[in-house]
Amino acid sequence: MTEESGRNGQFNLDGILCELGCFGKYQVLLLFLLAFRDSFLNMCNFNYVFTAADVSSRCYVPECDLVDALYNASWFASIVNKSEACQILSPYDITKNTSVVEDWSSLGVNGNNCLTQMIDEKRTVPCEKLVYEDYNSIVAEFDLGCQPWKRTLIGTVHNLGLVFSYILSGVISDRYGRKVIIVGTPLMVGAVGLLKSFSVDYWMLLMLEFLETALGYGNASLILSLETVSHNDRVVYSCITDILSNFGAALFGLIAWKIPYWRHLMRAIYAPLLVVVFYIFLVDEGVRWLLAHNKKYEAVRVLNKVAKINNITLSNKAKEMLSKITEERSKADQMVQACSEHPPPIFSVLRSKKILHRMTLISASFFCCMFVHSGAIINSTSISSSKYLNFSAMNLVDVPTRIITALTLNRFGRKTPICTAYCLCAFFFMTSAFVPKSIWWASIMFYLAGKMCSSYGIFSMTVLTMEVFPTISRNSLTNIANTFGRLGSVLAPQTPLLEQYMSGLPSVLFALAALEPALLALLLPDTSRVPLPDHVEEAERLNDSPQAIQIQLERMNPSPALIQQL
């Protein structure tokens, strides 16, 4: 339980949330609404994995492709090993080499055949044009085959836009509420994404890619999940929310399989986000945010609504608290008006040296966490023959990972599981890189295990981050840390280029990067047994000492038996 109206214990939100339960009709409906939203946002967030996928290509040979212009033309097999990427063996200039013309005539070459005798094996020239295996990708449609940096730049720009998005959404969420971001960002992403599907050239697509991510995304869903239930249930509830969204994200691989053309694929995943406009009527503002901003009357209305939908009769003590807080409506309104004249709370929060120190540690951790997590997903399309099944598998492994998270994160705290997960992550990725190609299945298993550990670590780090910051600026500070982390995501799309220097080099890099959050997690407080702090003073008192846990438990007013057990 936690206090929500100062230090006098007049209002106890966690006690009421315990009475309302964790999986009533209201909470289950919220779970599915957030899962629908987050599933399609996850698809859009990694759209470039398929829409900008690399496509096998070869040089266009004018003398031969006039007859057979297919990628796997039968004539090309005889000269394929004699050409470099984006370089082609120069054809003879028949206007200047009459001996070649005579040779062709003796061989019966009449323009309908293509023989190696037409090629000068001593000289190469750049390809003027490419023939692609298929034209489903941006790479083929905008002819980027000989410019791989343009292909990977799409993912880099996408993640660079997220740097701005997380700052913007965090400030808006803490200032104007979680609901604004939950409803607004999917609408922006959906609208810009649909426009992006009509891009006429590469640079238009790149501009819209940045605009989409700069105006959309954020992690308001996870924030709302943590703040909707009592502290005992927040990890389990958040894990279930993430499991449902991962099922949706895994579906992206199947959608891309059935709708391979990039324009149609974009429309299939961006259009459903426009349905989120109805969330204006279906999703309520977070109660904890309402109370932290002195919107007490609205908070009481939401709590009563939850009790009615869940068919729960609150205890007399809870009813007394709600009645008393309702009587303070006019006073609360005055406080809200006064607070609106003050600068955003984030500036006052960052004056705390402890908060600033945590921000630095978490930001550095997120940089490596997101580099490893995003890079593992992006490179997953090349670990076996089917890129669609690879991507789906990468998301489905998050399902058992979240179950493990729900079972362990409360039992063993926060720091130990994060440290253990990233040490294992480093081991699995490093092993995957050096497994012989003859036992490819072992490489895939180690890679999946590394991805599972990465997923466990980044989710647990996100939960810890949200728990160490106060409610008044929780989303802003979390998103600032995420912003630095997104710089790691900006680099991740470039990692596939490392394969040309050494097979498995991206996995080696992921293994080394995973060691940093494993070490930095040990310097953060453990928040598994304390309520969410609402103000700076409460956040500053968080640490992993037994005395601090005792103080927090006294604030929660639990039974003596529970205190003795802890």
Image: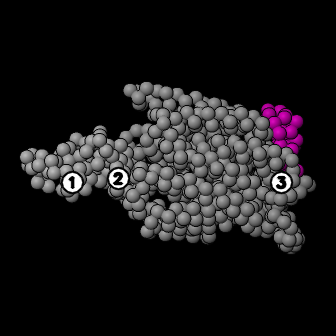
Q: Which numbered circle lies on residue 264?
A: none
Number of the label disc, if any, that sits on residue 350: 3
Q: Is residue 28 visible?
A: no
- Residue 299 location (% of width, % of height): 76, 64
The residue that appears at 50% across and 64% down in the rendered structure is 203
Q: Which residue is mark 1?
A: 96
In the rendered image, which residue does mark 2 sit on?
127
Quadrant the C terminus occupies: top right
Direction from residue 316 to residue 201 in the image, left or right: left
- Magenta region's main secondary structure? helix
Task: Tell which of 535 and 213 is nearer to you.
Answer: 213
The answer to whether residue 479 is visible is yes
Q: Nearer the viewer, residue 481 or 87?
A: 87
Start and end of the magenta stretch? Answer: 537-566
Residue most extreme to the right: 8
Q: Earlier in the sequence, mark 1 or mark 3?
A: 1
Residue 187 quadrant: bottom right
Q: Residue 126: percent from the left, percent from the top?
A: 36, 51
Classify residue 454 as left or right of residue 468: left
Residue 404 vertical placement versus 86 (above, below): above
Q: Amino acid at mark 3?
A: Leu
Vertical placement of residue 451 versus 51, above or below: above
User: Pointer 1 and pointer 2: residues touching (CB < 8 Å)?
Assistant: no
Which of the two discs, 2 and 3, labels the residue nearer the N terminus?
2
Above or below for 406 versus 180? above
Give yes or no for residue 101 being in the magenta stretch: no
Q: CA distance from mark 1 to mark 2?
A: 22 Å
289 vs 469, nearest the viewer: 469
SS at circle 2: loop
**Which amino acid, mark 1?**
Lys
